[in-house]
Image (tube, rainbow, N blue to C red):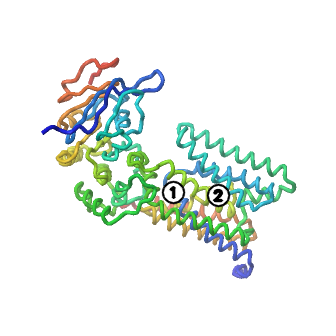
Amino acid sequence: MVLEALQYTFFQNALAAAFLVSIASGIIGTYIVVKRMSLVSGSIAHTVFGGLGLSYYLGTNPLLGATFFSLIAATFVTLIRKHARNRMDALLSALWSVGMATGLIFIFITEGYATDLFTFLFGNILLVNSSDLLLIFALDFVVVTATLVFYNVFMAITFDEESAEIRNVPVTLAYFILFSLIALTIVMVIKVVGIILMIALLTMPAATAHLFNKTIKSIMFWAFALTLIATVGGLFASFALDFPTGPIIILFAAAMYFGGMLVHCIRPTKQ
Amino acid sequence: MVKKEIISLENVSFGYSNKSFLENINLKIFEKDFIGIAGPNGGGKTTLIKLILGLLKPKSGKIVLFGKNPKKGRQKIGYLSQYDNVDLDFPATAMEIVLLGRIEKTLIKFFSKEDRKIAEKFLKKMGVWDLRERKLNELSGGEKQRVFIAKALATEPQALILDEPLSNVDVGAREELFELLKELNKSIAIIVVDHNIEILSKYSKEIVCVNKCVEKGAKYHAITRVCGKAKMVY
């Protein structure tokens, strides 16, 4: 009965989106978890809300506005990190709220905001259309290629930034690229589960994979696999139960995370 | 044979606005020196290292590394950060960590066969080749430090600076670590910051005491005198 979902175009699009988003989310989620950058990611995501509001007001594809704003947010985060590291916590929170406030104003001055507000905040993978898919594919391509190219340098700066600086690695530029990739991934993930739930989908699969894997590459792979399981599982479950997709996806990811922690705790340690 | 000067600080001071951390530092370090840097907490040991490495800018004075400014000259220095600066739970194997030492200057770096050979050489030199596939958090404190030193050596430096290499290392493994440094000292200069005066005076040829200003003496015991505004008492 559930399989009949497959004959609908919207469902096929949703499955394709789930697959594509899982790739970028698994890779970037790994960096966020390993380097503990949830607050940075949260700030970028909520700044994106400003972009969504703007493109909604202008009547363009929301993902375009979101992409633009996310890159502005990545720039701000890089500057804050470079010049005001001691105040990073407060400044990131400010960025977070200003983004939300801007978005809310734009949506307020646009007519018929109510339903779309809900979609922005909680996402809806079932509304992904073919032009969204194209954009998601392009963003995925950028994230994967950049990660392959900058992999070793990302590793150097996330492991020991000071040593990298002494080797004259362009650390700030490398972080800007990493934050930009986080920003682009957030844009994709927002389409699936929205701003509010975004951080959970981005981090829980990677955190689960982190429990059982010893290298960045293997964490990335398993984070991708778990994100795919959560999104596809969530899609089918929400179709069968007629529940909203985003929250179900998050509950799937959370169940895997808590299950993983449970196994990790009761498993005897090798040391 | 005259020893070549590799690091020199001339009248270097450092501080913020009216508060100074280091005053009028004069220090020369030569090739194949083994220098211990001691001093009380907050005395400016790490600040001194950061000035040498160009991570901080002096308020006044001149720092020269290998005849160049710190940002250029530091390429020839291997550096072991303090434990707090490194993520000890980082998901990487010992081999992957040591390879990171091969990265320099560029934003894009793929490891060559040559890079892997160099990593292998220093993993072997530090006696941790057999542990190369182990994850960082599966290693003991002493083993981790050996891996980190191998990473610093993979930069093929002419001097190695270690900031508190003994924190988190078992008492038993400390002398072993210093024996390795002694071995390395045959070809490169070693500069070690630590609290452990006993081990520093045993291995280093000279001890530099940092407490706002710098005192250099053959052995630590020679230096118990008034230095700057604070009296050094141990």
Residue assigned mark 2? A198
Rendering coords of residue B67 (x, y %): 30, 39
Q: Are marks 1 and 2 in contact (CB under 8 Å)?
A: no
Q: Is residue B146 visible?
A: no
Q: Amino acid at mark 2?
A: Met
In depth, the one of A194 and B109 nearer the eye is B109
Q: Is residue B22 visible?
A: yes
Rendering coords of residue A208 (x, y %): 52, 61
Q: Chain of mark 2?
A: A
| Horizontal side of residue A29 vs B112, given as left or right | right
Estimate the spatial distance between the alpha carbons at disc 1 and disc 2, rounded to whole Å.
15 Å
- Residue B9 position by quadrant: top left
Quadrant of image for the C terminus of chain B: top left
- What residue is drawn where x is 28% and y is 37%? B7
Residue A114 against residue B29 in the figure, above or below: below
Quadrant of image for the N terminus of chain B: top left
| Horizontal side of residue B89 vs B155, given as left or right | right
Residue B216 against residue A191 in the figure, above or below: above
Q: Residue furthest right?
A: A111
Rendering coords of residue B138 (x, y %): 35, 57
Residue assigned mark 1? A31
